Each structure stands twice: as C-alpha cells, then as structure tokens.
Amino acid sequence: EFSRTKTIDEQRRFLPIYGCRQALLNVVRDNSVVVLVGETGSGKTTQIAQYLHEDGYTTFGVVGCTQPRRVAAMSVAKRVSEEVGVELGQEVGYSIRFEDVTSENTVIKFMTDGVLLRESLTEGDLDRYSAVIMDEAHERSLNTDVLFGILKKVVSRRMDMKLIVTSATMDATKFSEFFGNVPVFRIPGRTFPVDIIYAKQPCEDYVEAAVKQALQIHLSQPPGDILIFMTGQEDILCTCQVITERLLELGDKVPAILVLPVYSLLPSELQAKIFDKAEGGARKVIVATNIAETSLTVDGIFYVIDCGYCKFKVYNPRMGMDSLTIFPVSQAAANQRSGRAGRTGPGRCYRMYTDFAYKHELLVQSVPEIQRTNLGNVVLLLKSLGIDNLLTFDFMDPPPQDNLLNSMYQLWFLGALDNTGSLTPMGRKMVEFPLDPTLAKMLIFSEGLGCVDDVATVVSALSMPTIFYRPREREEESDACREKFFAPESDHLTLLNVYLQWKKNNYRSDWCTRHFIHAKSMKKVKEVRVQILDICKQLKMTVSTCGSDWDQVRKAICSAYFQNAGKMKSVGEYVNMRSGMPCHLHPSSALYGMGVQPEYIVYHELVMTSKEYMQCVTSVDPEWLAELGPMFFSVKQPGETRAEKRQKEREKKAMMEKDMA
Ligand code: ADP
Ligand code: MG
C-alpha cells in the first residue's frame, strides 16, 4: 500500500534512518571509520550512499557500497537508481563478477565484496573512492573478512577516505574494536513484538512441515504475508509447488494466494516481484533462502516460517575440498529470521524445530565463512598483494591454520606457489583471472596444448550454475534431449558441445528453448567467455582451438583437478585417489550408465546430498595423472597386494559370467 500511495521521497523520509540523517553525517565527517547498526529495513543499504552523495562526497570520488551477495548488489542498485531518479548504470550502477553496469558517470557504485577486493589488487589505496560502505558486514562473508584487514590499512594511509561498516546485529562492538575503538552509531529501531511458536516434536521433513504451517496460516489466520525460510533453490521450488498443489486440491473456495520463490539464481525480474503488492488482495507467500534474513527487506510480512536450516559451503581439509552442506541455523540467524515478522506490526514466527533444539543444539553465532571454507583464492590474492606471511595478516578472526596450510599446499600443487611459498609466474597469471585457482590453472595450462579457446568455453560454462533446463513436468523429455549432447567421456566436453552447437545455430534463443537449455545462461556464458579471452589476450597468451582433438581439452581439465581425481571402485562409485574418500557418479552425468565406465576420472566438485556426488566429471588417461602428480598417483599399481589382485580376478570373473548369462 505504502509504496503505491506515497512518492519515493515520502517513502525515503519515512525510514527510521531519516530521523538521524544529520547526526550520522556529522559522525562520519568527524571520523574515518564508523560502525553503523540498525534493524533490517531501517534504510542502511538504500540510504547511506545517497546521504553521502547529497553531502558532497561524490564531488571528489565514488561512493562504493559492498554487498556479500550478487543479487543484493543488483537489486539495491536498481532501487537506488529509481530513488535518485537516474538510469541504472549512469550515476548509480553496480558491478558484480563478469557484469559491470557502471559508466564514467557513476558516483554511487554497488558491488560485491569480491569486486572491491579485486580492485584493491590494481589500486592498492582505492584512490577513486571517497567513501566505502561495507554493507551487511555481520554476514562475515569470506571476502568481507579479507576486506576488513585491507581497508583497515587503507584508511590508516588515506586521511580523506571514509569507511562505514554496517551491521544488522550485535557484532558492532567487535567491529569497532577491530578498527581501533571507532564510534558505533545506532539507528533507533521501530519494531514490533514477534510471538515465537516452536514445533512440539522435531520434524522429519521440514518442507512438509513448512507447507502445512503455511496452509494452516492461510486458512485460519488474519491477513498478512508469509515469509518462509528454506535452504536453497531445490527446497524452495519444492515448497512452492507443494503449496500450490495442496491449494488446488482444496478447490476454489480458498482465499487467493500468490506464491513467490526467491533464491540467488532466480532471474532478477522474477526476484523483483516480491516487492510488489499481490493483486486483488491475495496473500503473498515468499519462499526464500537466507537472503531474506537481512539483505532484502520485504514490507508487509506478518508471519515467518523458519525451517531451521541453511546451506553453507564448507571446506573439509581431510577431503581437501569444499562441499555444499545443509546445517542447522545459528541462534543469531534464527532471531534475524523471526525479526522479519515484526516490521509492519506485531507478528508471529513458527519455528519448525523445538524449543529444546533452539536452546541446546543451535550455535549461538554462525561460524564466519573464513573459518570454514577453502582459502585458495584468498591466499592467491594476499600473496599477490605482497603479504608473504599470511599467519600475520590482520584477520578479525583468523582462519584455522590447517585450512590455510592446506590451501597453500593445493596452490603449490597447482604450480601457483613455489617451495618457499612465494607466487610463481604461473601463480601471478592465475591472479589475473576472476576465477577459482583450479579454473585459472586449466586455462593457463591449455595454452601449451593449443586449446585456450575451447577451455575458455568450458570454464565459462562452469561459471554458470547450470545451462540445462529440467522442468518438473517434462523431466524425461528434457533428459532425453540433454543426452543428445553427451560427450560420453566427459561432462566438461558436453558443455563444450552444447556451446558449439548453439554457435552453429547462430546463437539463437529459440534453439536453446527447443533443446531444454537456458538461453539466458548461454548468453551469459558467451559474455563471460569474451571477458576471459580478453584477459588471456592481455596476458599475451596464444588463443587457439584444438578443433576436434578434444583429448587436448581433457588434458587441460586433468591438469587442474589433480586433487579431484578418482579411481573406479564399483559401478557408479569412485574413490578419491588422494583422500580415499568415496565419490559417486550423479545420474545426470554423461558418464552415468554408459556401459563401459572409465577407470580414472577427475571431477569439478563434490556435492553432498544423499551421498557424495561428483559434479561434472571427465574421464582421464592414467598417464596424464602420473605426469601431473606422480607422488599421489601410482597408477601403474606397483604396490597392489596379492590379495587385492586375487579379489580383482574374482570380480572380473563374476562380471564375465554375469555378462554371458
Ligand atoms: P536496511 O539495509 O537497513 O535493511 P534497506 O535500505 O534495505 O534497509 O531498506 C529500506 C526500505 O526500502 C525497506 O522498507 C524496503 O522495503 C525498501 N526497499 C528496499 N529495496 C527495495 C526494492 N527493490 N523495491 C522496493 N522497496 C525496496
Ligand atoms: Mg541492508
């Protein structure tokens, strides 16, 4: 209602932060660093950059605002450009990896923290910025944590630079201490009480429990929109679908409802829908990841349903890799979630877990990303900034030493670090690519194999979450269609194949649609490819294609994934040759059910669902592995014991007998 009837100016003046605009600007003027705390929705993200702009900071530099999430950077930039009344990409713009929507006129720039971090590589003192707002600092994303250390140095060198660190929670004191006891500015809140209702018993299926709860609210509670927190895309789509189905079963007597998913991969125009009022007074049900915890604020939410879980990328030093895993939320996150119900009026939060679980099983605070992920990229960045001893870097919370050493070891194996831990020429090249070290390595290695052009396609396609479209109602049809693109020896080559076919068909969108391929993702792949090849050219790499000699591409792939090499154990099952951990072929892989299964493979990443599934697999020649990592891969099997040999013979015999039968 509010956003419809009030002008943008009136809306701006209604925000809690507006009441202390001048006081805030005064504190900023008198201090280099200020920590700003305010409830979600108080106007931090959308207003501060504008206030600084109005106060003259953009006359001598850009006001930059970092976001831990791409989605937030885009949607906030769009909103602020509307508030300022300019076209997005002009005075107000955004920059995220592989997508720069700014121009020479841009004075307010939203970006991911990763983008600013990379900028600090080329412009150590970030001279073009008059002010930097590190937004959503409480999320403690990996890049934010590294930026903390870097920006602390920058502000100590640059007296003319302002740094504002915003937080929606109570970490404020910690932030303030880190920067040398800087002032903490609190925006007076305007929130309503929220009733918390716990599950009586632990639930077995949180999707089912959340759906039931949503329907119960919809059918028996007064008006007010519902926000459901789920772990990720899959759960979200499932929840949306089941709610819709159940309502259809109930017939047309049920009041109107509008179910909207929000997750990072959802196209932005669909995401924007959550801000619109539902037509005809329907009740809105928003099903979101923890992006709605603090980064996106939707007004009109009276009910929150919290499934109690979230998805995290976690580094497992034993396996030497990241995996996406579902974890219980922390108490702090649970409280953020429930707070979403009390923005417009008194609300209710239904937790799909018990009171006991909240008190005794949830961590008080979430573990910062820097303490749980692979640090390959960070190590590479810091090394190239000339920080030799990483153990002495000014981390707010230092990463576990094991993770740090493991990541360094991994970089050493990729050839990025030498025996003394310094960057090699290869490492220096790798930093130039805004890619994971593995993918950067793949590209650089491909030069010697004469297939940079082909590998650039593979790498670009891998930077997309998926290019295949698999609608629920047409799963079989889409699977059959995808199989036509299969390169039987490799999922990576399958991606290359799709791209080449698309190219042959003049990059047409209708071709994509007909073949169950996301046209948008393919366009993005094409753009990313151009950017990657630009960097290759800047590095004076020879860009050529190996034509149909795809073994070269597989060799390049092999060179990057030395630590993700697997040896076949049984049908569909491999063991990681370094860690001995089991890893399974996913049914969607081109190698799955192909009859002859390759003995040696490498894979892109491991995803933990019901078991450890490998994503994107390529069969490799054991010789290549031996060349690349002799100490790990004694593929010639000299050490095989007699017992193992006998067992193998038996298995072979059994298999042959089965075949004959
Ligand atoms: P904070 O950063 O303190 O959480 P924000 O500045 O993000 O607060 O939000 C302030 C207000 O602006 C909220 O009430 C929110 O509903 C509104 N808002 C933010 N983004 C959009 C958008 N894209 N469309 C419409 N309203 C928005
Ligand atoms: Mg915000």
Image (spheres, rainbow, N blue to C red):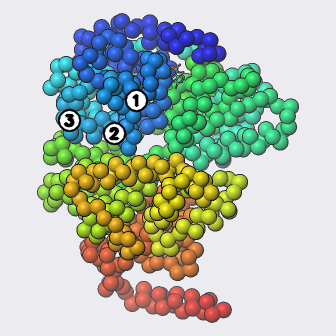
Is there any visible trace of residue 53 in the rendered image? yes
Toward the viewer: 298 or 644?
298
| In the image, the residue with mark 3 has its CB under 8 Å from the nearest atom of ligand 2 | no
Q: Given the image, on which type of amino acid does mark 3 rest?
A: Glu
Look at the numbered disc 1 and give the secondary structure of its residue. Answer: loop
Q: Mark 3 or mark 2, which has the lower sequence index?
A: 2
Q: Mark 1 or mark 3, which has the lower sequence index?
A: 1
Toward the viewer: 529 or 377?
529
Q: Residue furthest front?
A: 506
- Residue at horizontal 34 percent and vertical 26 percent from the top: 106
Quote the CA–CA distance across marks 1 and 2: 19 Å
Q: Mark 1 or mark 2, which has the lower sequence index?
A: 1
Res. 159 mark? none
Tell me the quarter of the picture where residue 121 sits.
top left
Res. 89 mark? 1
Toward the viewer: 7 or 203?
7
Res. 114 mark? 2
Q: Which residue is mark 3?
A: 123
Q: Given the image, on which type of amino acid does mark 1 rest?
A: Gly
Q: Kindly indicate whether the residue at mark 3 contacts the one at mark 1 (C-beta within 8 angstroms).
A: no
Tell me the quarter of the picture where residue 18 sits.
top left
Q: Describe residue 305's horizontal placement relative to residue 35 as left or right.
A: right
State which mark lies toward you, 3 or 2.
Answer: 3
Image position, residue 596 (x, y; %): 52, 81
